[in-house]
Amino acid sequence: MNKTAIILGATGLTGGILLDRLIEDERYTRIKVFTRRHVDRKHEKIEEFLVDLFELETLTELFTADEVFCCIGSTQKKTPDEEVYRMVDFGIPATAAKLSKKNNIQTFQVISSMGANEESRFFYNRTKGEMEGAVIEKGIPHTYILRPSLISGDRDESRPFEFAWKKIMTLGDRLLVGKLKKYRSIHPETIVDAMIYLANNPYQSGRIESDEIKDIASKHKK
């Protein structure tokens, strides 16, 4: 197919796995990585742009592809300054969607979080909700907002509370049944499988909850 993909957040847990998968996928011949620091992969498909992600709009001419995968995200502990946090979790995805619309990119995927709500009294959930609204507002034909529950897996940086919570969730997942299944933790590989399926198969645009992400990922493996 000779497809070109853009990845934002390729140095993170989920973005790094996505990068590896797209390298292996014969449908993709070019992978543009916009990042603040080098990725630890070397491959002829990768075209790396070392940039300040807060200034994406200055790179409009370079921001061209068939698909955009936005895996950017922080935590309140990692970024305690609310203004900076908003620049990361709202500003970067919203700007990426704006550039995608301007450059006629047809598919835009972004990882949000369960509980995102622009009317929430909690800053984190409200910011994610406002980001989702800004992305949907752009009207990109194939827009997918993935809302995973707690993402399992080992990160490079230390997050002691998150590590402990993951251990608890691993033990408690089996107790979450029926309507509560969507609260089960989710593997980053599962999110990546779903994203690749969505990029290459017809699916209704919109917000996709964690349990639906798992269902979509299972289709990718068939």
Image (cartoon, grey):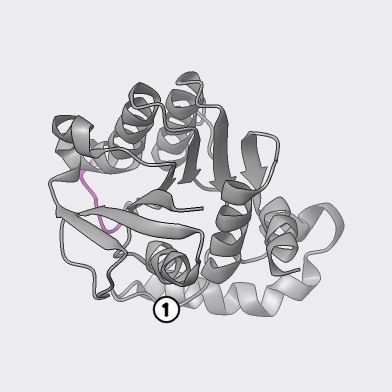
Residue in the foreground of this view, choosing between 54 and 218: 218
Residue 78, magenta (yes or no): yes
Is 56 within the magenta? Answer: no
Query: Can residue 148 be seen in this snapshot?
Result: no
Question: Relative to 95, is 200 on the left or the right?
Answer: right
Could you tell me which residue is drawn at 21 percent across and 39 percent down? 62
Is the magenta region chiefly helix, strand or loop?
loop
- For the image shown, how many numbered marks are present on the structure? 1
Q: Which residue is drawn at 30% across and 57% down?
A: 77
Q: Is residue 107 left or right of residue 160?
A: right
Residue 209: x %, y % from top left = 66, 47
Q: Is residue 4 placed above or below 98 in the rendered structure? A: below
Does any portion of residue 112 appear in the rendered image?
yes
Frontmost residue, 120 versus 56:
56
Q: Position of residue 65 (x, y in %)?
A: 37, 41
Q: Which amino acid does label 1 sit on?
A: Asp
Q: In the rendered view, would you say 127 is above or below 76?
A: above
Percent from the top left, x then y, of residue 100? 37, 31
Which residue is situated farthest in the front direction here?
1
Q: Which residue is drawn at 39% across and 49% down?
A: 4
Q: What stretch is highlighted in magenta?
A: 77-81
- Which residue is at a point 41% across and 69% down the rendered structure image? 23
Task: Determine the secondary structure under disc 1.
Answer: loop
On the image, the x and y values in percent for residue 88 come to 27, 43
Judge from the rendering whether residue 169 lies leftward or rightward of residue 52; answer left or right.
right
Q: Name the residue under label 1.
A: 154
The quarter of the rendered structure image containing the C terminus is bottom right
Residue found at the far right of this picture: 178
Q: How crowded is mark 1: few (under 14 residues within 10 Å), some or many (20 or more)?
A: few
Up the image or down, 199 lies above or below 87; here it is below
